[in-house]
């Protein structure tokens, strides 16, 4: 897999109103996003409701993504609470053409998820993986804080390629970046801090908001790359209200409403997640429109 750079959405998984997987809508989104300047897709991520999917559904989504990704990278979330199960799923998605896997910290037994337990887990997965492994820190959902020294310990493994850090903690991100070798790739997983994360040295953004405002997210990255920091800061200010709304405020239901508002197919959430209230849906629609106008200005 080529170096992880640019913007990748952790793609939503559309469901019908009865909770059934809407594979046709998922495929339609990928075909529509082919016209955007995205580096690839993350399938079975947190925003893809991976925790609510059955294994046959997961594999169907990976097949569909690989068939419609063109030359873009396909990263697949395979992190489960069992090391054995994580390895098994990792091998299956690699067989289906995943370019790399994104492995979430196990967390059900969080009091026992020490730095050493996590180290052993990630090393075992990487030892068995046919494809590069990216570590995934998502404390908001897992409740497991990322041990600051762990990335540096794991960076020497030949199949551990990098990390997605999603806490918005720029201090933690800075400590990780300062402790790992240049080949170890660090992706920002929080859109409200995309620009400062790039300034610190992150090379990519894996961002929920890229599902509904891909052009604006990419524009921030491109402005930073070209040295136009004033534009990057202005665009970051424009993106942040929408990014907060579709993550911290309204969660996945808000993100899916934003995908709908942007003209793609977000679909329904799967229970026990709750649908979005009409007033919140109107708020999201206005934020999507505002973000789009800011990018065009």
Image (tube, helix red, strand yellow):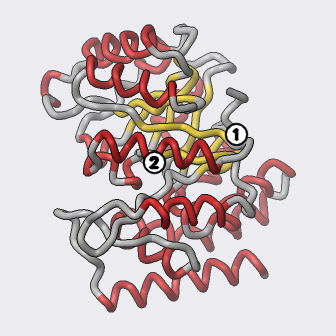
Residue count near mark 2 (Cα–Cα under 10 Å), binned few <14, some 14–19, many ≥20? many
Left or right, 83 with respect to 296, comes to: left
Q: Residue 186 carries which label?
A: none
The residue located at (47%, 16%) in the rendering is 129
Q: Residue 5 carries which label?
A: 1
The residue located at (50%, 51%) in the rendering is 10
Could you tell me which quadrant the C terminus lies in?
Answer: bottom right
Q: Is mark 2 on a helix, strand or loop?
A: helix
Left or right, 271 with respect to 73, comes to: left
Q: Is mark 1 on a helix, strand or loop?
A: loop
The residue located at (27%, 19%) in the rendering is 83
Can residue 261 be seen in this snapshot?
yes
Q: Nearer the viewer, residue 195 or 120?
A: 120
- Residue 283, given in percent of the width and then of the height, sits at 42, 87
Residue count near mark 1 (Cα–Cα under 10 Å), binned few <14, some 14–19, many ≥20? some
The quadrant in which residue 147 appears is: top left
The residue labelled by disc 2 is 61
Q: Dots 2 and 1: beta carbons under 8 Å?
A: no
- Residue 62, given in percent of the width and then of the height, sits at 48, 42
- Residue 256, given in percent of the width and then of the height, sits at 42, 70
């Amino acid at each position: 897999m080529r170096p992880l750079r640019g913007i990748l959405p952790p793609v939503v998984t559309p469901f019908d109103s009865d909770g059934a997987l809407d594979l046709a809508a998922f495929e339609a989104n990928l075909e529509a996003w082919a016209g955007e300047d995205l580096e690839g897709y993350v399938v079975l991520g947190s925003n893809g409701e991976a925790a609510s999917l059955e294994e046959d559904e997961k594999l169907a989504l990976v097949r569909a993504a690989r068939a419609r990704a063109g030359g873009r990278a396909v990263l697949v979330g395979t992190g489960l609470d069992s090391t054995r199960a994580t390895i098994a799923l990792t091998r299956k998605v690699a067989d289906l053409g995943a370019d790399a896997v994104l492995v979430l910290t196990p967390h059900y037994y969080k009091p026992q998820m020490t730095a050493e337990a996590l180290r052993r887990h990630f090393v075992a997965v990487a030892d068995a993986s046919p494809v590069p492994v990216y570590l995934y820190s998502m404390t908001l959902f897992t409740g497991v804080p990322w041990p600051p020294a762990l990335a540096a310990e794991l960076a020497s493994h030949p199949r551990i390629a990098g990390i997605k850090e999603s806490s918005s903690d720029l201090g933690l991100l800075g400590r990780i970046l300062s402790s790992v070798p240049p080949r170890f790739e660090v992706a920002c997983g929080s859109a409200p801090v995309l620009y400062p994360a790039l300034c610190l040295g992150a090379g990519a953004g894996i961002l929920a908001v890229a599902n509904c405002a891909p052009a604006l997210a990419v524009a921030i990255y491109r402005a930073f790359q070209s040295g136009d920091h004033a534009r990057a800061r202005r665009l970051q200010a424009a993106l942040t209200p929408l990014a907060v709304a579709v993550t911290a405020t309204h969660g996945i239901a808000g993100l899916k409403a934003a995908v709908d508002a942007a003209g793609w197919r977000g679909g329904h959430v799967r229970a026990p997640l709750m649908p979005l209230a009409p007033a919140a849906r109107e708020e999201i629609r206005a934020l999507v429109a505002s973000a789009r106008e800011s990018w065009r200005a």
